[in-house]
Amino acid sequence: MLWRLFVAGSLPLVGVPLDLFTPEDWWTHGLRREPVDHRGLAATELYELLVTLGMVYGFARAGGWRTAFDRLVAARGPWYRALGALVGALVVTLLIVSETLPAYPLAFAHLPYAELGGAAGSAVTYLLYAVIYLPLILFFGRLGDWTGLVHGVVNGSGAGAGAGTDTRTGPAAPAAAPALPLPGGPEDPAGWPQLRAAGLGEAADRLAAEAAAGRMNDVDHVRIRRAWDSVLVDPTRRTAFAQAVRDKGAAACGHPSGARDLPARAARHDLAVAQVRLGAVTDAEPNPRERRGTGLALDPGVLGTSMLAVGPSGAGKTTRLVRPVVESLMLQALAGEAAVIAVAAAGAPLGPDEAYDIVVRLGDPASVHDLDLYGGATDPDEAASLLAEAFVGDVPGLDVRRSATALAQLIGPFRAAHDRFPTVPELRELLDGVPAALGALRQALENAGRPAMLRELDARTRQYGVHGDPGPVLADRVALLDRPAFHGFFDTTGAGRPFSPRALEHPIRVRVDLPERGHADASRLLARLLLAQFNASVAARTDRSLFAFLAFDDASRTLTPEAVRGVQRLRSANAGVLLTLRTLDDVPEPLRTPLFGAVGCRVAFSGVTTWDGKWFADAWGTELVETRDVTSRTVYADRPMTRFLHALRKLLTGKAVTTDAVTVRQVERERWSASALANTVPPGHAVLSLTSVRGERAAPLLVRLGGAG
């Protein structure tokens, strides 16, 4: 609008510079000055062109046109950037051709073509065309990076030269993505160039044909790639690998279950990098600008630091966090890269039974599998420590080590006499000090000639009824499992099919259903038992090549001091846990600070209270931000004329004349305050921070959850 007023001559004083810097004889004398000849006309056209360019530059700077182009167009990829610059060049070209911009009249209307002649006139004309359009091409070519795009196409990177974002790192600007191989080229992963380079051309052809025919999925590709990596480590497997590929094609080196995919997927996965997409970073403050709009995904490198998620019921912890993570690890288990245990209440939406190798339904008589109460341990002291942690780890004031000693003094002699650990009813009788049970055990030890174990049993017998004896508390906790609903479970006689976390050396998929509705206390006890067994099992693994993961859909009243210490040690064992809570009130207050320090990933869902939000705010700490303080001071004039002008200005504007003093300083502010977490996080969103096992960190980000987002 301002430019149209300028062209129409409706802006006052705009033509003054033209009058000041040109001779008087170029213009007519009158109310409206007009050019006398071509000199005044050329000066007018040049002045209009310069003022137009100045307006465009000024409004572009004021409106942030370049920033808008970078964020809305260039951020989509190199082709979008080049196309956007091309559109801008065409628009400017149309303005020049239509003589809206007076470039043609200025360049061509003032040349003496009759004196130059035909050949010289043509040369000058083409030279002027170059003068007009060459800067235009250079400017928009640089804006659209046309040379970089052409170079990428020529070198075979194609459209894959776009910008990427690594969601696991801090707020540094993302590096440019590497050039992608051409489809069908010699480096195309679908052609298995690594096999061809190793001389297995026949196997590579078979796998390439399977992929081309659509008989190979992402799980097959990753599984076979992992098998080939094992061949590189142990060349003796080369012949077996080639034979398996030749015979089975994409089904070679399969999972023990025979499954090659899950029955259904609820999230977006990229198995090539073992990632599952959780959602997208929102455009709102205080997210860093370089992160806004980018996707956010998790992989074992991040989950290996363990994750704590807090949010009320209905916030989406199960469907938007637990299930995508468990689903990703189940796919990795099918590819031979991970082992996962999901623990949830019966009926939780963590996928169908067909997606798991083992489903343990505690309290359900139809359950095919059982749970090993002793975690696969053969040492009575180790088994006793696991049981003590589960039974009394949450009881304040009770020494867990003394409880473990009391249990070891019973299950050790029982194992020595019967070559197995006691069942739940037998353990309860021993803890209650039933004379018949103790007498039978004593007689069996005497018959077996085990005096050392007799001394252990006698030591335990002397503790019955003594002040501080943990036996009654242990017996009460065991009684929670000695219920009719659990009849037939926790069998130690060899009649059942017990599952133990010791099996995590294999790529298995396990789901444990807890009877939360009818046996809430027993479910919490079993959850503590599974966490204690998991911490002990992954630390004792000899082969840590598989990533082991334990996911709790509800970890309320599950954490103990020893469990938190065990979580801290998981990242060095190539393992991790996911702990979800409705509120931090379900964790004893002395454990909250160690818990936040033990996990590397923290998630606060929409709806957390300010009390819970304060713990997250303290864990995320502060950052330096630049603040501008503006102080207004009323100006008092000394001279009468100045006072009159100030009074007139105040009369017209209603405001006194003031001067502003601007102070710029850096202050520390919380990344996310407790109030912001409780009141500003929209439904379906969460604030999360990530840490990788290599120590890379991502500051807290507000994320819109949903794998398809």
Image: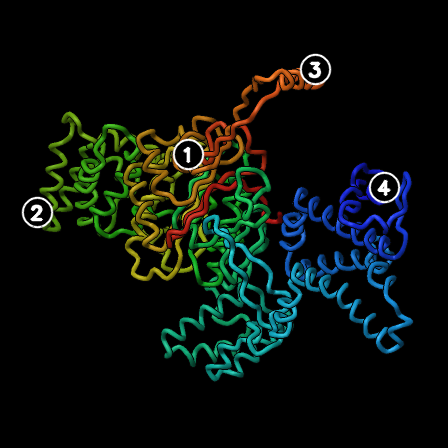
Compute the Cα span from label 2 to label 4: 115 Å
Other-residue count near label 3 (Cα within 10 Å), few / some / many at <14 / 14–19 / ≥20: few
Compute the Cα span from label 2 to label 1: 68 Å
Q: Where does label 1 land, which residue?
A: 668
Task: Name the residue located 14 percent from the left edge and 27 percent from the top edge.
Answer: 466
Q: First in sequence: mark 2 or mark 4?
A: 4
Q: Where does label 3 land, which residue?
A: 651
Numbered disc 3: secondary structure: helix
Residue type at mark 2 is Pro
Compute the Cα span from label 4 to label 3: 33 Å
Nearest to viewer (mark 3 / mark 2): 3
Compute the Cα span from label 1 to label 4: 53 Å
Mark 1 and 4 residues: CB-CB less than 8 Å, in contact?
A: no
Total label count?
4
Residue type at mark 1 is Glu
- Of residue 232 and residue 358, the one placed in the foreground of this image is 232
Question: What kind of colouring is applied to the model shown?
Answer: rainbow
Residue type at mark 4 is Gly
Does residue 80 appear left or right of residue 283 in this picture? right
Rendered-image quadrant of the N terminus: top right
Nearest to viewer (mark 2 / mark 1): 1
Task: Name the residue located 86 percent from the left edge and 54 percent from the top edge.
Answer: 41
Residue type at mark 3 is Leu
Other-residue count near label 4 (Cα within 10 Å), few / some / many at <14 / 14–19 / ≥20: few
Residue 9 numbered tag:
4
Question: At which x and y percent is residue 51?
Answer: 76, 48
